[in-house]
Image (cartoon, rainbow, N blue to C red):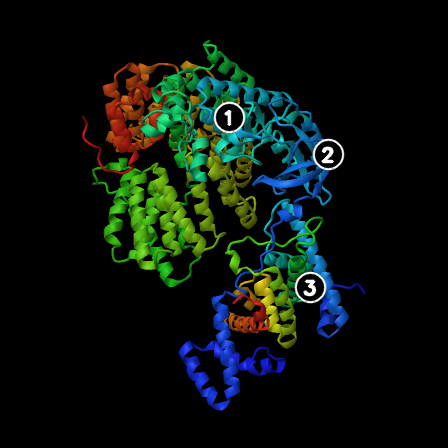
């Protein structure tokens, strides 16, 4: 049976169907029985089945037909006046081809670049050509010429560039073992090219080693100038804004400036930052973020938050293995010890200035950077100043201060006091019964007017609560569901009055009970877990809170869906937590998402919607996008006002966020005047002694300080502190925050170090008594800095140890803090850093 | 009356031979246009899956022709047949025409070369498939969808409205038929 007639196939077909459904053994039996009935059919079938086995072995038709990749179609194709020869590269930016002029008028080969259209903004081919011509005039010996730009016959935009045959600058330097001076001279050529472009109002935006080539003759050539600009959308164009554009678009994360990551304004300072990274690399052989590989998230954190180690430290033995250090040094024709010493000082300072996180703190221009490099080469004093002690510390402290002072404001949003919410509208008898039990319990809770009670009428809310919590445990043990609900309610009340630790315990038990009764992913269990994470968050254990919020969120997404109010609530809280962690860039998209969904689902004027608007404003401030933050916070304040009327605590809270946005833009006078309004309204509505009123007083004190009315500010700080001590008690977290802030920023900034230190010591003692690890570790850390500043290293180490014992874990800050610089290399310091880095609650190793 | 893909499909299903031809060429043009558009969007070596292309074609055409457009299963049956023609034509002409405005349907090469069907073999498979289509059009369609267009069994099951098991069984049957038809020329 070599050929198969159609008739034969039709006859065999149903049998084949049957055979193919059978297993091997069944099939054999089945074939045997068929053999009896119709031998010829059976043998044909057997032949086909054998054929099946053989084709299966050969993977017949298993692999789809291979067709040639598209290069074949492009090769030899004419693009404008050029003929494509061979592909040179292919990347996210698009494809690059080697080409020559079709008419032979021009001997040299060129590079034809097809930008990926995904990156190409609006505006179409005409704009592309026009811009291309504009860029073509950017003639400089160190910039690869843009020869032509256009759109091919089949609609693909392309660029024709000078083809540079060279090596990327870092490899060139290493291969030729160039010493620091030779490297700096090459770098000056790069700076000259960039300065020329900046003078022509063109920002590169993607400076990196692979875009900086050195020819065999040692000539520097920058590639791709203005390409990034061509990829911009038309709408962002404008005569006055050539040099300032929103971030995004084309860039390479490893060389991107913080503002490119966070979506800030891209300016000439952005190129300067990338040049700083390049210089760092040329000098040290290391990337500022340290040896890779990095995840995208690590890299973003490194760029946006972490101060890179100084170049001199980067080549040192503490960061590199002896072997790596000497290899790096050998490529610079020196030894690692000499390299370390050569970098220390001026080169450290120059690089640090170029790599400032804030664009305005970098050199004013690339030319200014070049000037300092030249001064260094001529052994003249450079212009850039090393960071002062106060500057570095103040920055560190400020970051913590925001978190401490605003923690209670934004995370929880409105905390419903009443139990009505949880139980209203439920008609099931059991629920109603439970609701009654709950109200009864609460009523009893507040009946504390026993005249014989030694507390008399001075019983505090705290005592009422504590008593309630005790009774909750005993009285409702037989009704675990009711107990769980009440535990959560009590926990939320504790949250409201700032007793976070106590709250956490109660809420955790509520969650555990619900988990046991209802299951891990029951909406009520998840509700308890949500508040548990909130309580953890308020105690400053941000990472733990973040993880828990993420877990709850994942479950809620699964169980309740993307758009359920609880899911959105958690996403909102997660966003706020991230802002507190200083990761506003991550928070902003989440909060935008919540806002968008709530707007759609709930409408613009619903309370939760406005809360997310307000939180978004908060995060935007954290991201340094104060202009947008101002707009958003203003909108939130107005919306709350429409909803609640002018004098409402929520409106005032929103205005408080607005003050922060205004302050961030340096408009201190305006911020102060708004703050005074807020404060006055709070006094009127909430009372002088309300938590928020007092918090607002301390903000005002700070603003008056910013407006340089130092005596007045000091008076306000003192008054706030007294007020808090009287109302909240000296060991209250807010009281401690004020004291801490006053010492570590206000006095410190003025150089009143003695005053700062004695105040911090007081804060520390009170915080320890209050079992408030946040303020204990922050004040101990700052005392350590001040002690080292006085020259007392021993005492500095002792205080550092106390800080770590109280949970200080920010090892990068500690290692890079210039206040602690003189401790570096001390074995005890290293030991402390290692202990802090372990991030456990295990006790520290014994002191020396 | 405007000639639409919808009306052509209707006529072809009623046995109108010239409508079937017109349908084939209309779909051919459409896929060609889509592929060119994809090519222009990427401006470089591009891996353009036949599956993606067909899905896109369906969405495009269904949107254009409105609610009376045939269901996805019927459409895919025709379109996959056209795709087979495109791929085989391309294989035949590959070395004859290297440049110009042609497009190519490509696939990332992830397998070893010896398992890949060569151009001549592809032509023979095409011819055998035409024979099979006369005998058992459903089997031929499965080969078009699976081998030429890269759909999974599950997707094909969805398109034809039968179980995945059935599709697998029919696929094996089609393989046997095709292998038998061309094996004289296959390397053993």
Asked if the residues shown at circle 1 and circle 3 are in contact, with their CB atoms under 8 angstroms apart, the answer is: no
Dividing the picture into quadrants, the one containing residue A760 is top left
C-alpha distance separating marks 3 and 2: 56 Å
Residue A763 in view of the camera: yes
Horizontal and vertical percent position of residue B48: 60, 53
Sort mark 3 into few (<14), some (14-19) or many (20+) by Cα contacts within 10 Å: few
* Quadrant of the rendering where the C terminus of chain A is positioned: top left
Please name the residue shown 70% across and 32% down the image. Answer: A148
Residue A719 in view of the camera: no
C-alpha distance separating marks 2 and 1: 42 Å
Q: Nearer the viewer, residue B107 or A588?
A: B107
Point out the residue furthest to the top here. A380
Q: Secondary structure at mark 3?
A: loop
Please name the residue shown 58% across and 30% down the image. Answer: A165
Q: Nearer the viewer, mark 3 or mark 2?
A: 2
Label 2: chain?
Answer: A
Q: Secondary structure at mark 1?
A: helix
Q: Are marks 2 and 1 on the same chain?
A: yes
Q: Secondary structure at mark 2?
A: loop
Q: Is residue A360 above or below residue A39?
A: above
N-terminal label among 2 and 1? 2
Horizontally, residue A361 falls left or right of residue A524, namely: right
Q: Where residue A273 is drawn, which disc sits there?
A: 1
- Residue named by callout 2: A104
Q: Where residue B67 is drawn, which disc sits there?
A: 3
Horizontal and vertical percent position of residue A263: 54, 34
């Amino acid at each position: 049976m070599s050929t198969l007639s159609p008739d034969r196939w039709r006859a065999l077909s149903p049998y084949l169907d049957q055979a193919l459904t059978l297993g091997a053994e069944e099939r054999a039996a089945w074939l045997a029985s068929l053999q009896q009935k119709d031998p010829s059919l059976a043998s044909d079938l057997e032949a086909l089945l054998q054929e099946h086995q053989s084709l299966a072995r050969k993977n017949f038709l298993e692999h789809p037909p291979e067709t040639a990749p598209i290069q074949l179609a492009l090769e030899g194709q004419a693009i404008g006046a050029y003929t494509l020869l061979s592909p040179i590269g292919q990347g996210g930016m698009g494809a690059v081809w080697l080409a020559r002029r079709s008419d032979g008028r021009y001997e040299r080969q060129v590079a034809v670049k097809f930008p990926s259209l995904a990156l190409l903004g609006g505006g179409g081919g005409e704009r592309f050509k026009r811009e291309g011509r504009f860029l073509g005039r950017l003639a400089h010996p160190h910039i690869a010429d843009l020869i032509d730009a256009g759109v091919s016959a089949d609609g693909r935009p392309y660029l024709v560039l000078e083809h540079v045959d060279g090596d990327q600058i870092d490899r060139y330097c290493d291969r030729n073992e160039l010493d620091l001076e030779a490297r700096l001279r090459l770098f000056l050529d790069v700076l000259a090219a960039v300065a020329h472009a900046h003078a022509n109002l063109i920002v590169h935006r993607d400076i990196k080693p692979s875009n900086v080539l050195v020819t065999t003759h040692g000539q520097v050539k920058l590639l791709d100038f203005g390409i990034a600009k061509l990829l911009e959308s038309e709408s962002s164009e404008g005569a006055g804004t050539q040099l300032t554009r929103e971030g995004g678009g084309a860039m390479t994360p490893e060389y991107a400036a913080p503002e490119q990551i966070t979506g800030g304004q891209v300016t000439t300072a952005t190129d300067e930052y990338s040049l700083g990274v390049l210089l760092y690399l040329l000098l040290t052989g290391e990337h500022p973020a340290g040896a890779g590989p990095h995840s995208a998230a690590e890299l973003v954190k490194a760029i946006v938050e972490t101060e890179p180690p100084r170049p001199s430290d980067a080549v040192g033995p503490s960061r590199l293995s002896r072997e790596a250090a000497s290899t790096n040094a050998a490529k610079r024709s020196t030894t690692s010890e000499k390299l370390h010493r050569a970098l220390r000082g001026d080169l450290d300072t120059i690089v640090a200035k170029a790599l400032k996180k804030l664009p305005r703190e970098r050199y004013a221009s690339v030319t200014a950077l070049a000037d300092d490099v030249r001064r260094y080469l001529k052994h003249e004093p450079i212009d850039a100043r090393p960071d002062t002690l106060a500057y570095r510390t103040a920055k560190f402290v400020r970051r913590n201060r925001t978190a401490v002072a605003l923690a209670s404001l934004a995370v929880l949003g409105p905390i419903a006091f009443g139990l009505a919410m949880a139980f209203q509208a439920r008609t099931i008898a059991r629920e109603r019964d439970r609701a009654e039990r709950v109200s009864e319990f609460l009523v009893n809770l507040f009946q504390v007017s026993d005249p014989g009670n030694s507390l008399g009428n001075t019983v505090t809310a705290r005592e009422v609560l504590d008593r309630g919590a005790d009774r909750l445990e005993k009285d409702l043990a037989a009704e675990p569901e009711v107990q769980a609900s009440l535990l959560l309610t009590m926990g939320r009340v504790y949250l409201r009055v700032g007793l976070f630790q106590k709250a956490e315990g109660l809420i955790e038990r509520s969650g555990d009970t619900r988990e046991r009764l209802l299951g891990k992913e029951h909406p009520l269990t998840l509700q308890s877990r949500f508040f548990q994470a909130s309580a953890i968050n308020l105690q400053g254990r941000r990472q733990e809170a973040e993880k828990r919020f993420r877990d709850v969120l994942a479950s809620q997404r699964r169980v309740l869906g993307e758009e359920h109010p609880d899911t959105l609530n958690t996403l909102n809280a997660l966003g706020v937590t991230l802002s507190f962690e200083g990761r506003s860039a991550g928070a902003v998209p989440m909060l935008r998402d919540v806002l968008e969904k709530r707007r759609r689902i709930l409408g613009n004027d619903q309370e939760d919607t406005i809360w997310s608007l307000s939180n978004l404003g908060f995060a935007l401030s954290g991201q340094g996008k104060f202009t947008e933050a101002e707009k958003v916070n203003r909108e939130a304040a107005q919306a709350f006002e429409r909803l609640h009327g002018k004098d409402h605590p929520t409106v005032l809270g929103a205005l408080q966020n607005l003050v922060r946005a205004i302050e961030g833009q340096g408009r201190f006078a305006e911020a102060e005047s708004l703050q005074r309004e807020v404060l006055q309204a709070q006094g009127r509505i909430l009372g002088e002694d309300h938590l928020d009123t007092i918090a607002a007083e301390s903000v005002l004190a700070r603003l008056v300080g910013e407006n340089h009315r130092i005596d007045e500010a000091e008076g306000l700080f003192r008054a706030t502190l007294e007020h808090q001590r009287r109302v909240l008690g000296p060991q209250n977290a807010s009281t401690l925050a004020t004291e801490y802030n006053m010492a570590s920023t206000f006095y410190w900034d003025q150089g009143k170090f003695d005053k700062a230190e004695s105040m911090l010591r007081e804060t520390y003692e009170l915080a320890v008594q209050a079992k408030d690890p946040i303020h204990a570790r922050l004040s101990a850390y700052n005392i350590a800095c001040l002690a080292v500043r006085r020259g007392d290293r021993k005492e500095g180490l002792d205080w550092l140890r106390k800080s770590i014992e109280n949970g200080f874990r920010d090892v990068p800050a500690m290692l890079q803090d210039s206040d602690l610089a003189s401790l570096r290399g001390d074995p005890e310091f290293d030991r402390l850093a290692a202990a802090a880095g372990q991030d456990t609650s295990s006790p520290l190793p014994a002191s020396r | 009356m405007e000639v639409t893909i919808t009306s052509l499909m209707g006529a072809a299903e009623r046995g109108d031979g010239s409508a079937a031809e017109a349908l084939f060429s209309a779909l051919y043009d459409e896929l060609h246009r889509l592929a060119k558009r994809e090519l222009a969007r990427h401006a470089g070596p591009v891996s353009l899956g036949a599956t993606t292309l067909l899905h896109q074609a369906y969405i495009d055409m269904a949107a254009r022709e409105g609610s009376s457009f045939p269901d996805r299963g019927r459409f895919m049956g025709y379109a996959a047949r056209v795709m087979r023609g495109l791929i085989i034509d391309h294989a035949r002409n590959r070395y004859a025409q290297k440049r110009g405005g042609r497009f190519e349907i490509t696939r990332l090469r992830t397998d070893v070369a010896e398992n890949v069907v060569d151009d001549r073999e592809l032509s023979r498979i095409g011819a055998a498939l035409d024979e099979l289509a006369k005998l058992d059009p459903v089997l031929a369609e499965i080969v078009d969808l699976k081998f030429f267009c890269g759909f999974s069994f599950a997707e094909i099951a969805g398109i034809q409205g039968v179980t995945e098991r059935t599709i697998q069984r029919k696929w094996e049957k089609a393989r046997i038929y095709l292998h038998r038809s061309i094996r004289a020329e296959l390397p053993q």
